[in-house]
Amino acid sequence: MTRTLLASTVEQPQAISRRHWPVLLGLALVSEGLYVLLLLALRPIAGLGLVPTPLLALQPWNNLALPSSRVEAISLLLTLLLALTACYALAGWRALAGDRPGSSGSMLGLVLGPSLLFGLTLLCLPTLFSDTAFASLFSGRLIALYGLAPWRTTPPALVSDPYWSWLTPLTRHSPLVYGPLWEWLCALLALLPGASSPALGLLLLKGLLLLAHLLNTLLIWSLLGRLGASPRAHFTGSLLYAWNPLALLALAGDGHSEGLLLTLLLVALWGLLSREQEGRSQAVALLAEGGALVALGLAIALSPLALPLWPLLAGFSLWQRAAAGSRWSRLWAWTWRLLLPAVVVLLLALPLWHGADSYRAVMAASGWLSFAHSPLALLVPLLRRLYTPLAVLLDSPRHRQPAQPAELTVKGGALFCFALLFIWLLASTSARFRSGRDCPPPTAAQALSSLITACLLALGAWLLLLSFNFWPWYALPLLGLATLRRRDALSGSALLFSLTALLSLAMLGISSALGQALEGLLIFLPPLVYLTGAFFWRGRRAIFKEA
């Protein structure tokens, strides 16, 4: 009887784990079917905002009867995205509710296998949600083949270039300004054999970002193991990123650089954690820290989304060693840690800089001059109504158009609020690493968990307050950082934010200012409501329990 009890105790988790494999594989097959339906449904219908690609002519099912009106097309696309969201939510819930599904190899295979299948399917996507991939490849060709500077006010009209015809009219008359690292990577892609074909160049770019997506999954897997996560949290965190529809559509489907940005941020976190391993010499630890800061500099050179993480990552080691060394040694430590990423950015950006033309192009492409998919745009009409009586009272030509003062007020107020939030976050994060007489210093895993939380809050505040030109794929770094944390209200709101950003892909064709502002409200409001509600609900329960 004792042997039977021991055998049932040992075999019960295995029996439970076997029941999860068919469910997750079934959800993966359903998701794959939905991605195939996206290949059929995504066509350049007027008003949907889709950009045709050379792959559209290669599809054998172009004669299918599809919705011709804008409302029907948006409804079909939104239905498919909702179905993908439901499959993803069920897979995440099943992974959270289940036990360990087997060995580490089988868990990793279950995470990577369907993700690779989804990505290979989306490589054949006949249309894009934006022409950023073609614009990036054209910008790289300007550097590598024509010897021209891409950071100009408007790109030169190279009608003979094979990529010119695939740019939208708006892109042809807008500055092609991307991060310097992304410019050089696209220039290297332009030198590859066969890259002169837009179809092959697009597949190369999307294939590179699919590899970055798989590498991100492996880095999240490794970081969760080093952070001491449980086997269930280890499996769930990796699956929540690898199977996320927004990550797959934005990288393998649309070819955006935010996946590579997340790769560099994860490499920086991995290097900072590797520095704290026991048995490491001081030279090896310093080398690992320098590599992490170089990865941070490359991330900043790839996208300005990494800017708010710069002081947090640079001060991580100093907060752990606040009492070590004299005042001048700590000042020197702060200086070289802040300057090393800046040197990396300058080395990559200086060859692309050409004076005032580059400055005007960078300012025009930064997103600070307009509101797109930002909920803060809803405040501008209210301020215009308040400024109109003032303009009439002053009777001055400069104040007769209150639109510009209203926008400047909103942007200045958002910048001021972000500065206050960031200073508070920087001070509170540094205080967590100070060990008093009665409390021991935090371990490397605990310190990095606090750093990840601080980065998540800083990046979320940056996207909410300062990304006036917000696009759905900007949520990918937030998603990757959220999967490294425990499952709580903060990480849950970040996952919800990625899903609301996914659903907004069906509304990218909206061009009116009010429609884009409402779209931004639909993206940001559900995560904020969820986070605020969870905070007050859990606080009320804690107070009730203490009473």
Image (spheres, helix red, strand yellow):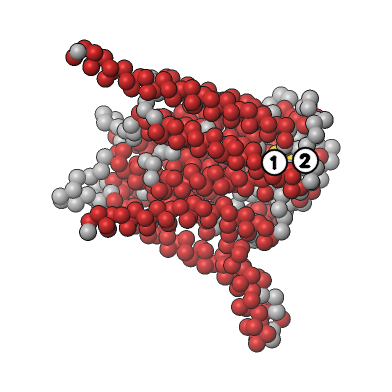
Give the mark, 2 or 1, whose residue is nearer the N terminus. 2
Disc 2 to disc 1, C-alpha distance: 8 Å
Quarter assignment of residue 161: top right
> Which quadrant: the C terminus?
bottom left
For image coordinates 72% across by 37% down, the residue present is: 42
- Count neighbours of disc 1 (C-alpha within 10 A) and say few if under 14, some if 14 to 19, many if 20 or more: some
Query: In terms of depth relative to the viewer, which is nearer, 107 or 433?
Result: 107
- Count neighbours of disc 2 (C-alpha within 10 A) and say few if under 14, some if 14 to 19, many if 20 or more: some
> In what element is the residue under mark 1?
helix
Count of picture labels:
2
For image coordinates 39% across by 30% down, the residue present is: 98
Query: In terms of depth relative to the viewer, which is nearer, 541 or 387?
Result: 541
Where is residue 103? Give x, y as percent: 38, 19
Can you see residue 435?
yes
* Kind of residue indicated by mark 1: Leu
Where is residue 34? Give x, y as percent: 63, 31
**Left or right of 279 in this view: 359:** right
Where is residue 102? Give x, y as percent: 38, 20
**Left or right of 432 in this view: 123:** right
For image coordinates 50% across by 46% down, the residue present is: 496
Quarter assignment of residue 268: top left
* Kind of residue indicated by mark 2: Pro
> In what element is the residue under mark 2?
loop
Name the mark on residue 67.
Answer: 2
Eyeballing the image, is 471 above or below 203? below
**Left or right of 29 in this view: 161:** right
Please say if the residues under marks 2 and 1 sit with CB atoms less than 8 Å apart: yes
For image coordinates 52% across by 35% down, the residue present is: 88
